[in-house]
Image: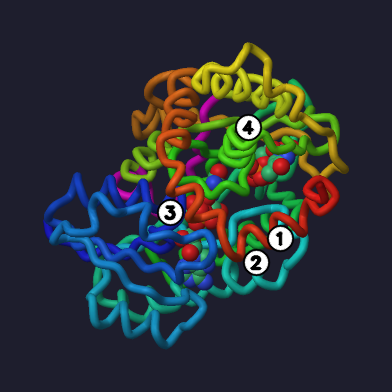
Amino acid sequence: MQRNILITGGAGFIGSHVVRLFVNKYPNYQIYNLDELTYAGNLANLKDIEQKPNYHFIKADIIDFESILNIFREKQICGVIHLAAESHVDRSIKDPFTFAKTNVLGTLSLLQASKICWENNKDTRFYHISTDEVYGALEMNTDLFTEETKYSPHSPYSASKASSDHFVRAFYDTYELNTVISNCSNNYGPYQFPEKLIPLFINNIVNEKPLPVYGKGENVRDWLFVEDHARAIDLIFHKGQTGETYNIGGSNEWKNIDLIKELIKITDELLHRPKGYSEKLIIYVTDRAGHDLRYAIDSTKLQRELGWQPQQDFQTNLRLTVEWYLQNSDWLNNVTSGEYLNYYKTMYNEIYEN
Ligand code: NAD
Ligand code: TYD
């Protein structure tokens, strides 16, 4: 079947993996990657597929409702996979307005365009990609987040994502828009912007720069390989029940400090450095404000109803990820120049003084 699908945020980390999967797997679909190319968006993430006849790039801001509506009409969009967002918690603490604008108003603008254009079309779907952070924080060694867990966001980032999730449900309840939502745990893999823990720390280990551990490094995250997330998105887009929510997670909980030591071990080994060489780079810095203690996802519903399972094991994928960053230093140098470098230097001024 032929379909015109709009993927927002396709030049970002997860979006680029989703665009690649859809372009390669569905030659009958026309894939429109809509992205504003903020600091986090990079078309170099899609070099390998940009010449494919079913791939199209549109530079646009999701907040600009008139442009979005024109794009929907002109391209006859009948499916949306919405990933565009401001995605970094530390930035949201510094600048919450940008998060409310992009994540809340931007999502509303896409929902409204879908509602207007899809009134007489039954073969449609609006798929909103969200995060486990909307559920708040768990205590150590207690329950997991399920689809029934009450929303309790703590950071401006998670509050903006929670708000956008509510708007998506409101459009299903009020206008019967064909919506589906998924809430995923922390992703890792190639093409992740090096402000997030794993690529930032790999880059700093390579360059022998400090590894700033927030607080005592005891916070826990559930890590999922980005390609497993992309496969879940494919399944949910095609087979998920309308109006439903699916949790996606790796069942792979790591205390930050243990994960950091594992990263050091793999990176040192690949760089032929002595065992434990880079542990001296670890420094403990002031904790993140409102730092959620633990995230952990129960993805039983997705496994039982749609048959999804993460492929390969964490050790294999983490090693593969470190190898990718070591082999793609041009990509890293490119994205860490300019605006990002200034931001990072301001964040860790005291660390970089020397
Ligand atoms: P990212 O920051 O790497 O990419 C975001 C993309 O959105 C960038 O390409 C950016 O240019 C684009 N964008 C930002 N503002 C825009 C605007 N106003 N208009 C159009 N495009 C805009 O993010 P990511 O890590 O790939 O996350 C993608 C989605 O997945 C987000 O919605 C995020 O909340 C969600 N998510 C991420 C994770 C994770 O671990 N990274 C986990 C669960 C859910
Ligand atoms: P991050 O990758 O920012 O993802 P999120 O905040 O969405 O979970 O951070 C993952 C964990 O690592 C989180 O507990 C915060 C911690 N962290 C550090 O200790 N130091 C850092 O420099 C960064 C970026 C994160």
**Gap between marks 4 and 1, in whole Å?**
26 Å
Q: Earlier in the sequence, mark 3 or mark 1?
A: 1
Sequence-wise, the earlier of marks 3 and 2 is 2
Q: Quadrant of residue 102?
A: bottom right
Label 3 belongs to which residue? 180
**Which residue matches tag 4?**
205
Please tell me whether mark 2 or mark 4 is closer to you in this view: 4
- The residue singled out by tag 1 in the image is 92
Mark in the foreground, 4 or 1: 4
State the CA–CA distance, disc 3 to disc 2: 22 Å
Asked whether residue 241 is drawn in magenta, I would say yes
User: As displayed, is residue 119 above or below residue 186?
Assistant: below
Asked if ligand 1 lies within 8 A of label 2, the reply is no
Residue at 62%, 74% in the rendered image: 101
**Is label 2 in contact with label 4 (beta carbons under 8 Å)?**
no
Disc 2/disc 1 C-alpha distance (Å): 6 Å
From the image, state whether disc 3 or disc 4 is nearer to you. Answer: 4
Amino acid type shown at disc 1:
Ser
As measured in the structure, the alpha-carbon distance from the residue carrying label 2 to the one carrying label 4 is 30 Å
The span shown in magenta is 236-251
Please give the residue where the numbered disc 2 appears in the rendered image. Answer: 99
Foreground mark, 3 or 1, reads 1
Residues at marks 2 and 1 touching, judged by CB atoms closer than 8 Å: yes
Q: CA distance from mark 3 to mark 4?
A: 40 Å
Q: The disc labelled 3 sits on which kind of residue?
A: Val
Question: Could you classify mark 2 by the number of other residues whose Cα lies within 10 Å: few (under 14), some (14-19), or many (20 or more)?
Answer: many
User: Is disc 3 in contact with disc 2, using a CB cutoff of under 8 Å?
Assistant: no
Q: Position of residue 139 (x, y in %)?
A: 79, 30
